[in-house]
Image (spheres, rainbow, N blue to C red):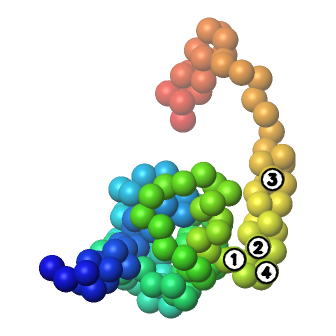
Amino acid sequence: MSKQQVAQDDDKLRLDKWLWAARFFKTRQLAHEALELGRVLVNGERVKASRVARVGDLLQVRIDKLVYNVTILALASQRRPAAEARLLYSESEESIAAREHQIGLQKAEHASFPYGEGRPTKKARRDIIRFKDNW
């Protein structure tokens, strides 16, 4: 192999590995599954996990109900601290605002749920069983 081919091979990085290194997913397996399930779009298209990540690609990453619209700024094959991982991509202002709005909605929804009184007592459990049987 020539030095030029080695340099080109170093520039090639699987998308699932980049997502893991950029700390969007805790493991490469989770990043791979997200790509296979279509939760990550590259330039608006579904892609395979083996696709080569390129600087300038626009990614739409959906994690639970949160959507991140990011642009790849740099490639990294090793998982580094979060402060360094944030330098690998830039997120649009609209994406940040929409995500913060969604987080606010989730917090409000969670606050509106009534809290239980803990585990049912033995008598309460019997009453629950009796109610379900008569239903």
Identify which amino acid the numbered label 4 is placed on: Glu
In the image, residue 11 lies at what x, y percent?
38, 79
Residue 33 rendering spot, x and y as whole percentages? 37, 63
Instruction: Determine which residue is flagged by label 1.
Output: 91
Secondary structure beneath dot 2 equals helix
Residue at screen point 81% across, 68% down:
101
Q: Amino acid at mark 3?
A: Lys
Of the numbered discs in the image, which one, if any, rests on residue 107? 3
* Callout 1: SS: strand
Seen from the viewer's position, the closer of residues 21 and 61 is 21
131 vs 118, left or right, is left
Callouts 2 and 3 close, C-beta under 8 Å: no
| Distance from Cα at disc 3 to Cα at disc 1 | 23 Å
| Residue at x 79%, y 34% (from the top left corner) | 115
In the image, what residue type sits under mark 1? Glu
Dot 4: element: helix
